[in-house]
Amino acid sequence: MLEPYNNRNLLYLNELKNNLFDNFLNNKLHHSLLFVGEKGVGKATLCYHLANKILDYNTTLKSNEPLSLFGEPEDEGDTLSEKNPTFNLI
């Protein structure tokens, strides 16, 4: 089993990640979030993917430049590619 920080797949939680990211975009994301549940359901992986999306937005998606410090923006899917520079930095 992969550690959450090495897991490039976010299964079944992509919609939740996108809802939280929408809250971030609208300045409605709370300053702290508590994820609870059984071990192995993807809580930590969700956190890493959400952090990646926020960092990716702050560096590449927000700018008009095709490339920025961290490279090209990542696809919106539930799997991060090996080329995703923000995920590799996390």
Image: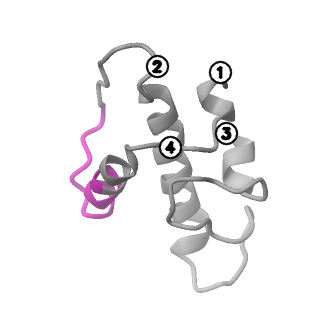
For label 2, the crowd category at 10 Å Cα-Cα, with few meaning under 14, some 14 to 19 and many 20 or more, is few
| Mark 3 and mark 1: Cα distance apart in space | 19 Å
The residue that label 4 is drawn on is 10
Say whether residue 18 is magenta: no
Camera-nearest residue between 29 and 75: 75
- Mark 1 nearby-residue class (10 Å; few <14, some 14–19, many ≥20): few
The disc placed on residue 1 is 1
**C-alpha separation, residue under disc 4 versus residue under disc 2:** 12 Å
Inter-mark Cα distance, 3 to 2: 20 Å
Residue 70 point in image, percent of width and height = 73, 61
Marks 4,3: beta carbons within 8 A: no
State left or right for residue 12 relative to residue 77: left
The amino acid type of the residue labelled 1 equals: Met
Residue at image x 32%, y 55%?
Answer: 24
Mark number, residue 90: 3
Q: Amino acid at mark 4?
A: Leu
State the separation of the CA atoms marked 4 and 1: 14 Å
Q: Earlier in the sequence, mark 3 or mark 1?
A: 1
Amino acid type, mark 3: Ile
Q: Which residues are magenta?
A: 19-32
Q: Which residue is mark 2?
A: 40
Determine contact: label 3, label 2, CB under 8 Å.
no
Closer mark to the observer between disc 4 and disc 3: 4
- Element under disc 1: loop
x and y percent of residue 7 in the render? 64, 36
**Secondary structure under badge 2?**
loop
Near-viewer residue (86 or 36): 36
Q: Residue 19's image quarter?
A: bottom left
Circle 4/circle 2 CB separation < 8 Å: no
